[in-house]
Image: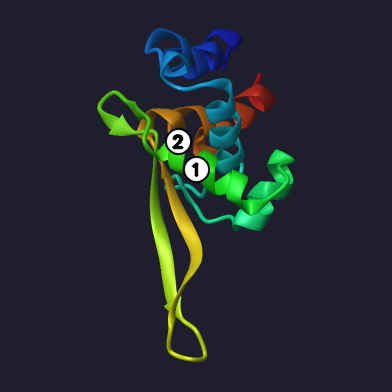
Amino acid sequence: MNKNNNFYIWSTPIIKDGLLVEISPVDWQTLTTLAAYIDEQGKCNPSLEDLCAVLGLADIASVSKRLSKLEKKTFEGLPVVTVKRGKERNDKGVWVFSKNEYQLHPAVLTIFSLSLVRKNHQAREDD
């Protein structure tokens, strides 16, 4: 695979389709942090504590604020990230929030897809 193919994977959603016009640099940092945790279906569920540490933020409230802001952003008519808020019952039978599950936009997945990364890596080894 040549360098132009790698450029195409990144440039289509980011440059040609205008993803960076839709989101701020802070949103991009948050999105790429979530992407570091994705599985092959584009889902991830890092804890707010982990996101706070990776993003270098002072508190969980700052992470929650960023996620809420990012959740409202759309690209190509779909949310950039969809948040499924986890809930479970604690020992006292009270519902409490647990880990959230994040689903990234399909175009974002083309940038960070594990299968694409593996294919690109394999192609480089074959060259």
Q: Secondary structure at mark 2?
A: helix
Q: Image quarter for residue 101?
A: bottom left
User: Type of residue at label 1?
Assistant: Leu
Q: Residue furthest bottom?
A: 92
Say how the picture is coloured. Answer: rainbow
For the C terminus, the image quarter is: top right
Type of amino acid at the residue the image marks with label 2? Leu
Structural crowding at the residue carrying mark 1, measured as other residues with C-alpha within 10 Å and reported as few (<14), some (14–19) or many (≥20) = many
Q: Is residue 45 visible?
A: yes
Q: CA distance from mark 2 to mark 1?
A: 5 Å
For residue 92, the mark is none
Task: Evaluate if marks 2 and 1 touch, with contact meaning CB atoms under 8 Å apart.
Answer: yes
Q: Is residue 119 visible in this depiction of the protein?
A: no
Outermost residue, left side: 77
Residues packed near mark 2 inside 10 Å, few (<14), some (14 to 19) or many (20 plus)? many
**Which residue sits at x=38%, y=35%?**
105
Q: Element at badge 1?
A: helix
Tell me: residue 28, above or below residue 91.
above
Q: Position of residue 117 (x, y in %)?
A: 58, 33
**Going 46% across and 10% down the picture, which residue do you hit?**
15
**Which disc is residue 67 wearing?**
1
At which x and y percent is residue 92?
48, 91
For image coordinates 45% across by 36% down, the residue present is 69
Residue at which label 2 appears = 70
Q: Quadrant of the N terminus?
A: top right
Where is residue 8 shown, x and y percent of the image?
48, 13
**Residue 112 rendering spot, x and y as whole percentages:** 53, 33
Answer above or below: position of 109 versus 82. Answer: above
Compared with residue 107, is residue 11 higher up or lower down, i.e. above or below?
above
Tell me if 117 is positioned left or right of 97 in this view: right
